[in-house]
Image: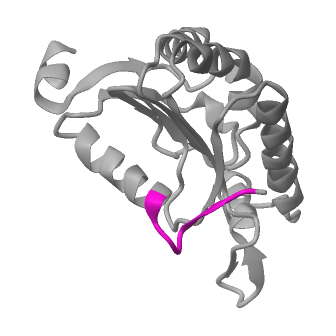
Amino acid sequence: MKYFEKHLGISNVFKQKGDDEAKKDYKKAIAGAKRRVWAFGVSNGEFVNDNFDAIVSAKAKHSKLDVEICFVDPDVDVIDASNNKRSLVYMYDTTKNKNNDSDQRQRVETNAKRLIVRFKENKVEAKVRYISSTGYISGMVIDDFLYFFPYVAVEQDNTTTPYMKIHANSELGTPFVSFLEHLIDHPKFSREAS
């Protein structure tokens, strides 16, 4: 592992995104965050449920902490191979389950709106965004680390795929973080949820 960390910046590889070791690691990272906590996901349901209190606590300790929770934009439509107009949320869900026939854009919208309310109720300044991107995004940037998983879970729970922790300022981390920064700030691919 030392070779991968030294040359590529890979600090750790967890068995899966949802395993206890991974959750413990990024919850600890969020609790100690001083600069940024960015999360990217389709509906962010599990992330918010598991980490909301840690984000509130970290923000209370460091008022300048940049908190950005980014959801797949439920209003973006794409054309599938059968020439049907579908939401981007539907396309991501179908990647996970080829028999998916349900458009879950409402789930994303509901989760984003609930999060906005929770942040307001807790007096936490944070940005909740909708992102549109052709690549699947699921991960976090917490200060100097990037957590992400390659989306290789077809017809299975996406929390069962390997999850990586990478130094943000490394050969592997820098291009990923640059891409996420580009998305967050992009005038056409990012908008505030409301």
Q: Nearer the viewer, residue 174 or 86?
A: 174
Which quarter of the figure has residue 153?
top right
Q: Is residue 53 left or right of residue 5?
A: right
Residue at image position (79%, 42%) is 116
Which quarter of the figure has residue 172?
top left
104 in relation to 82, above or below:
above
Residue at image position (76%, 77%) is 86
**Residue 2: x %, y % from top left:** 16, 13
**Residue 170: x %, y % from top left:** 19, 34
Number of numbered discs: 0
Q: Nearer the viewer, residue 45 or 20?
A: 45
Q: Quadrant of the C terminus?
A: bottom right
Q: Is residue 68 left or right of residue 122?
A: left
184 in relation to 152, above or below:
below
Residue at image position (88%, 49%) is 110
**Residue 126: x %, y % from top left:** 63, 38
Q: Is residue 107 left or right of residue 163?
A: right
187 in relation to 155, above or below:
below
**Residue 133: x %, y % from top left:** 53, 65
96 in relation to 6, above or below:
below
Residue at image position (47%, 15%) is 29
Q: Nearer the viewer, residue 96 or 28?
A: 28
- Residue stretch in magenta: 185-193
Q: Is residue 188 magenta?
A: yes
Q: Is residue 78 left or right of residue 143?
A: right
